[in-house]
Amino acid sequence: MFQTERMRKLKIVTLDKYAPSIISELHEAGTVQIDDISERIQQDPEIGELLTPAKSTSKTGRISSLLMKTTSLSDAIANALMFNTSKKDKIHSLINPELIVPKNVEPMDTDALIIYAESVLDDASTEISPVQDKLSALDTEASRLNSKITVAQKLINFNYDLGILADTNTTSTIVGRIAVESASEVKAELNKITDEIVIDETNSDEAFNSFIVVSSNEYKDTVYSTLRKFGFDNLDVSGMEGKPSDFIANANARLSAIANEKTQLQAQFKELAKKWDDDILALKEQLENEKDKNEIYTSFGETKNSKVFEAWVPVKKAEETKKLIETASDGYCVIEEEEIPDDSEDVPVLQNHSGYVKPYEILVDMYSPLKYNEVDPTLFVAITFPLFFGFCLTDAMYGLLNFLVGYFVLYRGLGRNSETSKDFGKIFMASSLWAILLGLLTNGLLGDFSSRVLGMGALPTTCLDAFTNAAVILVIAIALGLVYLNIGFLLGAINNYRYGNKKDAWTNQIVWFVLEIGIVFLALGYMLPAIGMIGIIIGAIFIIAAFGLLFWGGGAYGIMDFFSYMGDVLSFARLLALCLATAGIAMAVNILTVMCGTMIPYIGIILAIIVFIGGHIFNWLFQTLGAGVNALRLNYVEFFAQFFMGGKNRFEAFKAGRKFTKLNK
């Protein structure tokens, strides 16, 4: 519960012919992380004399090529499924996707999968490629026409057939635009080049004039160079016929026809996409799995007839994994199990909670991977994150809305196909229950809606009104903070003792227990005459001892840690601050609602409804965001800072992806 999975390292030697079956079984089981030993072989001469780094199989290149084709086709199909889909439907498919039903597939070796993939891709491409090619050709034509329309619009004031502006054997025609202020100077410079030149000019718009310059071929380069000096914008009229206005009309008519053709082809493509989508997604997943299996050999060592590899495995799965390897190799293997020291830095870390706590692993993992053998705080986060979230929100109606959102995500939305979304849905629902409970206890139901708008007085479940009992709620928040920080100090001391850092344990964590004991005795001495001076003296001794520990740990600067401690404690006052912020803004919305309804004639009721709904939606969203951020902050900054050591290696299972496929056994 408070530790990550205990790990073992398996060192395996097997014959080459059994390696593929072992890899396949391990890949499907997903219980191990393969350790890369190739670099160690190259760096250690003794190992290098016995082993050479293994290479990926000869089929890897072909598998990768087929995977690229499949991915490209899958992307095209995904785009086709969105053809002629409204924004509403796109949003609906995003937040409420169809449930993925895995396709049953048979076990296949690499050669069989290659043959199968080629067959599926050929069949799919035979139907889809012609439609894709036609759509691509239409897009190219439409793009060219739009470009030519832009050119024709710039030449709209010329009354020429654009087809006669092509170059001939003896003449060169240059068409383009130049800034109005440069037009006269350009014409003068061009006329200096030769008398064998014709220049036609017309206004294009307020800033530019359009030019048509015809000269003999021998002066073409000189004419163009002169035009470029003045910022000439060359226009390509090749392939254009008719007057500019006629060309634009004809091009627009063709674009309309292209749009109709595309609509028909897109509808055809969409039907083909629906037909092939499941098969292509399943094939893509199969190829990804096969690619993983073929590339994993690069982490192995090898001899002439054998393969050598190492794998991390949780202790709970070690025996099961060894039996699996022995069965897959018909007993032709040697397996050595290595014990792992608790202070090892290279061990991959695997969290393995279950039930209610499991989703909260993601919140801890967002902060940092754990260090092997340090205390796992996931259980504490699972308890306090929803509590802090609910404390910050403290409104029963807002909590109910969040609960419905979490329920939708979990059972109707992304959670049906995504484990991450499922986890967030569960976290959101648990946090919302705390918001509902604390809202009912503090008279929080859309703020003071029941008393101000309905005139019914406080909720019957009210124990502490957020406004009239703010001081009491502050004490509760600070008390929660002290308890949680002390748990953090305890975990930090345990971690430091485990790793032999006894001085750090005393000067960073235990010191605060000493200080708190001193403060308690000091307070009792002042408050209880029966204890009196004895309590004050004992308290003073503990407080002096605490500051002595701080000085021992960091000298004069160590004493400054007292202010950090006080800052951490007082930081939990944010629970009250956000509680009051939620209630305060909700109350302001209710006041404005009542004012609109009672003080504004005729349209007052309508305005009141708009203010009420809009204001509470804004407050709900804003305060929900604030509650989530601050609940995380109290864990990450105040709690984790007391003990969290952090590691660098997450357990990355060598595991087959089975989202779109289900292997028949």
Image (cartoon, rainbow, N blue to C red):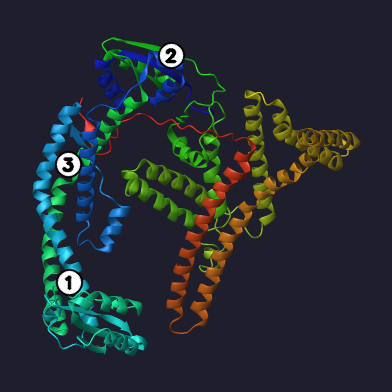
- Whether 552 is drawn above or below 337: the answer is below
Please identify the quarter of the rendering in which residue 30 is found: top left
- Whether 408 is drawn above or below 506: the answer is below
> What is the residue that sits farthest to the right in this orientation?
533
Residue plotted at (32% across, 49% down): 412
Q: Callout 2 environment at 10 Å: few (<14), some (14 to 19), or many (20+)?
A: some
Residue plotted at (50% across, 18% down): 340
- Percent across and percent down for residue 260 are 12, 68
Query: Quadrant of the image for the C terminus?
Result: top left
Residue marked by disc 3: 279
Q: Callout 3 environment at 10 Å: few (<14), some (14 to 19), or many (20+)?
A: some
In screen coordinates, is 579 left or right of 531?
A: left
Calculate the distance from the C-alpha at mark 3 to the C-alpha at mark 1: 38 Å
Please identify the quarter of the rendering in which residue 141 is found: bottom left
Give the mark nearest the N terminus, 3 or 1: 1
The front one of 493 and 394 is 493
- Percent across and percent down for residue 440 are 53, 53
Give the mark nearest the N terminus, 2 or 1: 1
Q: Amino acid at mark 3?
A: Asp
- Percent across and percent down for residue 586 are 54, 64
Residue marked by disc 1: 145
Q: Amino acid at mark 1?
A: Leu
Whether label 2 touches label 1, CB < 8 Å: no
The numbered mark at residue 337 is 2
Residue plotted at (51% across, 47% down): 434
